Amino acid sequence: MFIGDKKGWLHFKETQLNSILFIKQIKQSILDHEVIRISLSSRILFFLVKKKKYNPVKIDF
C-alpha cells in the first residue's frame, strides 16, 4: 500500500519504476484518481493526483 503525502504527491523510487509490472499496477491503481502532473526529480518520480472520490489517495500493490 502506498499513501500520498498531504499535498497529493505520490512518490516512487526509480528502481520500482524500472519494473513494467509495477508500472501496470500504478496505472491500474490510480484509475479512481486524475493524474494532474508527473515529474522526475532526483531519481524519484512524483505523481500529483486529484482525488475523484472521498477516500484519501491510496495505492495498493
Image (cartoon, grey):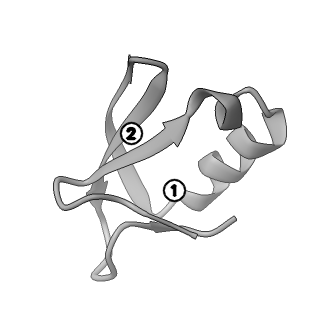
At label 1, the amino acid type is: Ile
Figure check: 21 above or below 39: below
Which residue is under mark 2? 47
Assess whether mark 2 and mark 1 are in contact (beta carbons under 8 angstroms).
yes
Residue occupying the point 38% across, 34% down: 46
Secondary element at image label 2: strand
Q: Secondary structure at mark 1?
A: loop
Most extreme residue toward the left, as rendered?
Answer: 7
The tag on residue 18 is none
Tell me the quarter of the picture where residue 8 sits.
bottom left
Among the two numbered marks 1 and 2 on one chain, the one whose residue lies closer to the N terminus: 1
Residue 44 position (above or below residue 2):
above
- Relative placement, left or right, of 54 versus 17 is left
> Which of these two is toward me, 16 or 30?
16
Marks 1 and 2: which is nearer the front? 2
Residue 4: give x, y in percent of width and height: 35, 59
From the top left corner, tell me how far across and down residue 43 is, in percent.
49, 20
* Residue 31 versus residue 37 in the image, above or below: below
Q: Quadrant of the C terminus?
A: bottom right
Relative vertical location of residue 57 with respect to residue 39 in this rendering, above or below: below
* Residue that numbered label 1 is attached to: 30
- Residue 37: x and y, percent? 30, 31
Query: Could you tell whether 44 is left or right of 35 in the image?
Result: right
Q: Marks 1/2: CA distance?
A: 10 Å
- Say few, some or many: other residues with alpha carbon within 10 Å of mark 2 (under 14 / 14 to 19 / 20 or more): many
Residue at 40%, 17% in the rendered image? 42
